[in-house]
């Protein structure tokens, strides 16, 4: 997107929203459940960004994603804070890449707490990579019509003489 003098930018008050003040390990620990619980808001935001190709048009959807994530982590803090922190700390301290494989026990404890308190199941392996059709409340943007130009150079008539190439054929191996 190119910014020109005619481009209107949103006011700073429109851009201010409470941020998720969490570490990478905490975001990674809650990522599967967060992705499942905020799937609709995330899909709406990504669909808006993809279709409109203008981030200014999708500020409301972006705020909805942030609010969904804030609500999710508030619920987790209220009900499963200890289990969540053990899992996040394990991810942070067990390996340099925050690998899940080192923390399966604490993951199981956290998943059980989430299941018991909210009745949310951890999404199955590959859930987020499956192809899905998204039903959106927004109407699809109108597609621009492709401009078709008439052929500027008409072809040669069929009876036009075609002498052999002066220096041989480009495809000499086909002759």
Image (cartoon, grey):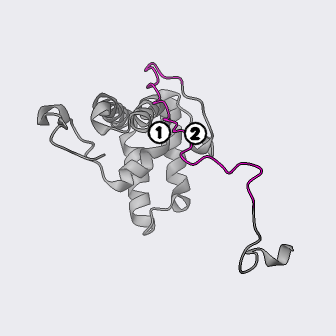
Mark 1 or mark 2, earlier in chain: 1
Label 1's element? helix
The residue most toward the left is: 12
Residue 163 lies left or right of residue 111; in this view the side is right
Tell me, yes or no, whether the two marked residues, 1 and 2, touch with CB atoms within 8 Å: yes
**Main secondary-structure element of the magenta-colored stretch:** loop
The tag on residue 86 is none
Percent of width and height locating residue 68: 36, 31
Could you tell me which residue is drawn at 34 percent across and 30 percent down? 61
Of 167 and 67, nearer the camera is 167
Of 44 and 103, nearer the camera is 44
The tag on residue 123 is 2
Distance Cα–Cα, label 1 vs label 2:
9 Å
Whether residue 170 is situated above or below residue 54 in the rendered picture: below
Start-end of magenta stretch: 135-161
The tag on residue 35 is 1
Number of the front mark, 1 or 2: 1
Whether residue 160 is situated above or below residue 95 in the rendered picture: above
Could you tell me which residue is drawn at 40 percent across and 45 percent down? 84
């Amino acid at each position: 997107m190119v910014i020109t003098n005619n481009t209107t930018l949103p006011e700073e008050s429109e851009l201010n929203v409470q941020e998720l003040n969490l570490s990478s390990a905490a975001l990674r620990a809650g990522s599967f459940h967060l992705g499942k619980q905020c799937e609709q808001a995330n899909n709406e935001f990504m669909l808006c960004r993809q279709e409109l190709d203008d981030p200014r048009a999708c500020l409301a959807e972006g705020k909805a994603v942030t609010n969904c994530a804030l609500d999710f982590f508030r619920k987790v803090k209220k009900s499963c804070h200890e289990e969540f922190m053990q899992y996040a700390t394990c991810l942070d301290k067990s390996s340099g890449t925050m690998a899940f494989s080192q923390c399966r026990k604490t993951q199981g404890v956290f998943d059980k707490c989430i299941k018991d308190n909210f009745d949310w199941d951890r999404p199955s392996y590959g859930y987020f990579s499956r192809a899905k059709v998204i039903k959106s409340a927004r109407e699809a943007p109108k597609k621009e019509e492709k401009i078709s130009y008439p052929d500027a150079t008409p072809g040669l008539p069929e009876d036009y003489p075609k002498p052999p190439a002066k220096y041989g054929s480009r495809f000499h191996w086909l002759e």
